[in-house]
Image: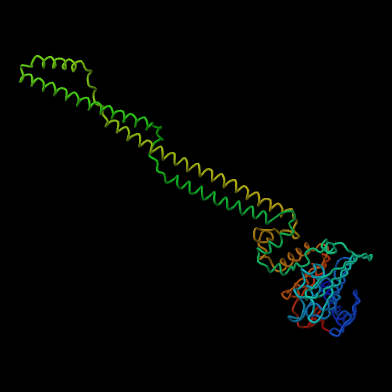
Amino acid sequence: MAQVQSVADDLARARVTAQQAAAAKGSGPDPTKAGTTASGGFRLPNLINIITSASNKLLGIGEGNINRRVAIEIRPDGSVVPITGKNAQGKTAVLRAIWALIEGKVAGPGQSIRLGEDEAHLYGDLGAYKITRTIKRDKEGREEWSLKVVAADGTRITKTPQAVLDSFKGDIGFDPLGWARLPAKEQALALRSLVKGFDFDAAATERSEAFEERTTANRKAKEAQAAADKVQLPEGPEPKAVNLRDMVDEIADAHNHNAQVERETASRARTQKQIDDNLDQAERLRAQAATLEQAAEKMQWSLDTMAPIPKPIDTAALQERMGQAQQVEAVRGLFGRRRQFEAEAKTANEDSARLTGIIEDLDAAQHEAIAKAKLPVKGLALGENAVLLNGLPLAQAGTAEKIEVALAIAMAKNPELKVILIDEGSELDSDAMEFVASLAKKNGFQVWIAKIDETRQVGFVIEDGRVAT
């Protein structure tokens, strides 16, 4: 109850200070010493004035000629600074002014100077440094931003003044409630900045490449194994190899031999017929019998002394052997094809296992980096596409847990400039506001919250670009 009362006191002080600031209408310090203008009538017509303590909390903000606002000065007190009012009155712009003071032009709107004016100013006192940003139009109408940083001892920082702010600014533009409303995947991406020394994009690229290669390897392994399985082998072991070339040569030699035998048989048949013809002629021609008989005897002797005719070779047996050898080779071809496919499947599986190892190593390195990051909430972790709390998606957490996680991340992103900006805070009811205030006070932070409220009783009420009186 004491803590709730303290939070209520913070909110009450903020309301009182808002009323005082509205009554003062720009009576705060004027670091630029700017005079009044016809369009403004305030002491700070061209000034956004932000004053902070040495602990880097904002003690006040004033702005002039930024967008549609003439001049605003706010001097808050407490851990929570509500910026309230109806829609389209300039609440969000107050938060953007704080952001632009620290970040510069990159955080400002596209058109920063109020219509009809030629320049505007931002001013902030961080204790250790005083910051002034001046925005002017050049001859072509473009806005030029300049920065002046002065140390507490009065020394002006002339060399890379933005680097001085960058050294402690953290992520001033991080909106914890805006982050909590993001889809789970975008929440996880935003949280990666707290994991130092690990390149998520490079790891994701390498993992994606390895995953694609593994997919290809798995496909090749599956195709090769499927092809191997389609090869139907006969029963029994794989037969030994046969020399088909020698058998072809043997068959060719057999054919040549048989042709020679046929030719020789035909030749001898012709010779025998010649003998018979001669004998017949001898009978008919007795007068020439002696001569013919001598010739016949000589031819007979020649015939009788010839070598025996060899037996024909059975080519049918050779053809049968040839068919058997071809069947053996066909079977061996099946075994060879299966071995080839199985080898391809083995190689592809080995590639897949190697790539799986790469993916597991990358995942392990990412998990190790996240584990070493010491995220700001116990049980908070980064899943592949979601932020996890105690092992469950953050979306399943309760409202208080979500607010606590979002604020803890914002605090981790802004460890030195202890200011958090929350836009569209209307979803925070009174209990949630008190919870935010308690967390802010406990951790020494100041939370600026823009929210719709038409009672004109809460925080600093913005109406038509001014603090309401």
Residue in the image at 54% along x and 43% along y? 347
Query: Which of these two is toward me, 255 or 189?
Result: 255
In which image quadrant can residue 435 be found? bottom right
Q: Position of residue 427 (x, y in %)?
A: 71, 74
Quadrant in which the C terminus appears: bottom right
Where 332 falls versus 431 (above or below)?
Answer: above
Furthest-right residue in this view: 153
The answer to whether residue 393 of the structure is visible from this angle is yes
Q: Position of residue 234 (x, y in %)?
A: 38, 39
In the displayed structure image, the side of residue 68 where residue 159 appears, left or right: right
Where 77 falls versus 393 (above or below)?
Answer: below
Query: Which of these two is toward me, 234 or 137?
Result: 137
- What color scheme is it? rainbow
Where 332 falls versus 64 (above or below)?
Answer: above
Residue in the image at 68% along x and 67% along y? 182
Residue in the image at 20% along x and 15% along y? 305
Furthest-front residue in this view: 287
Q: Position of residue 249 (x, y in %)?
A: 34, 30
Where 86 falls versus 323 (above or below)?
Answer: below
Residue in the image at 44% along x and 45% along y? 229
Q: Position of residue 451 (x, y in %)?
A: 75, 76
In which image quadrant can residue 17 be found? bottom right
The answer to whether residue 76 of the structure is visible from this angle is no
In the displayed structure image, the side of residue 214 where residue 52 appears, left or right: right
In which image quadrant can residue 285 be found? top left
Quadrant in which the N terminus appears: bottom right
